[in-house]
Image (tube, rainbow, N blue to C red):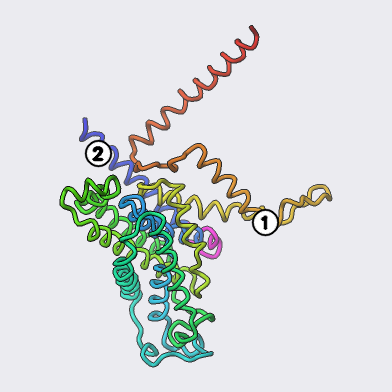
Amino acid sequence: MKNMTKNKNKVYTIIALAVIIGILAFLQSDTAEYSYQISILERSAIYAVVAVSMNLLTGFTGLFSLGQAGFMAIGAYIVAIFTIPVGSRASVYYVSGISPVIANVALPIPVALLLGGLAAAALAALIGIPVLRLKSDYLAIATLGFSEIIRAFIAAPMFDTVTNGSYGLKSIPGFPNIFAVFGLAALCIALMVLLINSSYGRVFKAIREDEVAAQSMGLNLFRYKELSFVISSFFTGIGGGMLAMFMRSIDSKTFQVALTYDLLLIVVLGGIGSVTGSVLGAFLVTSGRELLRFFDDPLTIAGVHIPLFRSGFRMVIFSILLMVVVLFYRRGIMGNNEFSWDGLFRLIRGIPDKLKKGRGKKAASKKGGAR
């Protein structure tokens, strides 16, 4: 029976993957027509990578960090600096000039992405020595401060010949197609899932549940916290590099604190401690913001101007919708659970029963009122 269920689940998974690939192929077949939809999906996939890496630290290890924007900036700038075509660099660094050290250094995109992740991980290893000895809110404040320091260094005039300061970096090569974005995102998420399900992942969860108990078992808490922090930052750096390739131009303002808050929103909405929730949250939050954009346009009905419809109003609607979701799903959409076909089918089968119960309660209340 179990083998039959496993085989059915494999078939469902293959069908789902085929449908997803088919949709992506359809969109890719006419990039001019579906450029808007492609951009939403690509940004969602990139945010999914960073959200899962944030959840690895927050949801699975119990470390509350707000430094994601800074580590994304490191990965993004490493990728941008070393992948901008050598022939275009003079026009990009036209104000302050480019450092001769990097002027003629060009790396393949995969190598640059890997280097961006390693640079973010290396800095995380250094930062982690002092900050990981802090607890809860203090850790969040410290990592947030380091994130802002990273951004300040990027924008500092002394580094203009490398980062181009406030002018930012342009002419960054993009992804060849949507499959490259989704493929790389899937690879990163799959590697993190393997880590979570490994013996290291079980240690991370033990630290999250009870540090005292974990330490009494002989575990070196600092070592494993540092490992989780470094690995999370590595994938965050890769996510930053992917974002740079997606946007094609970046500056220090791209990686403000608001970006970290957006990622935290995705993790909380999807469910702290759920990889599936982080992926689902990334697509819902990113697409939700874009699909509500029509609220920013002025609306006139029968010659009457509706004052609510103006620039920025979509974020009000978006915030209200998020509040509604949080009220009904206080632990996030997925909680700390992962997606399974059995769970999905149970949910679908339970809908008629819930509707019947709702009707029964209404009928009972009407009878009670009649008495």
- In depth, the one of 219 and 73 nearer the eye is 219
Q: Is residue 34 magenta?
A: yes
> In the image, what residue type sits under mark 2?
Asn
Span colored in magenta: 27-37
Mark 1 crowd level (few <14, some 14–19, many ≥20, 10 Å Cα): some
| Foreground of the two, 63 or 94 | 63
Residue under label 1: 296
Q: Secondary structure at mark 1?
A: helix
Viewer-side residue, 40 vs 16: 40
Answer few, some or many: residues within 10 Å of disc 2's Cα (few below 14, many 20 plus, some between 14 and 19).
few
| Element marked by disc 2 | helix
Position of residue 165 measured from the top left corner of the image (x, y, whole percent): 50, 82
The residue lying at 34 percent from left, 70 percent from top is 120
Q: Are marks 1 and 2 in contact (CB under 8 Å)?
A: no
Q: Residue at the spot x=41%, y=80% of the render?
A: 81
Q: Note whether residue 62 is visible.
A: yes
Residue 342 horizontal/vertical position (percent): 33, 35
The quarter holding residue 45 reads bottom left
Which residue appears at 43% of the width and 41% of the height?
A: 331
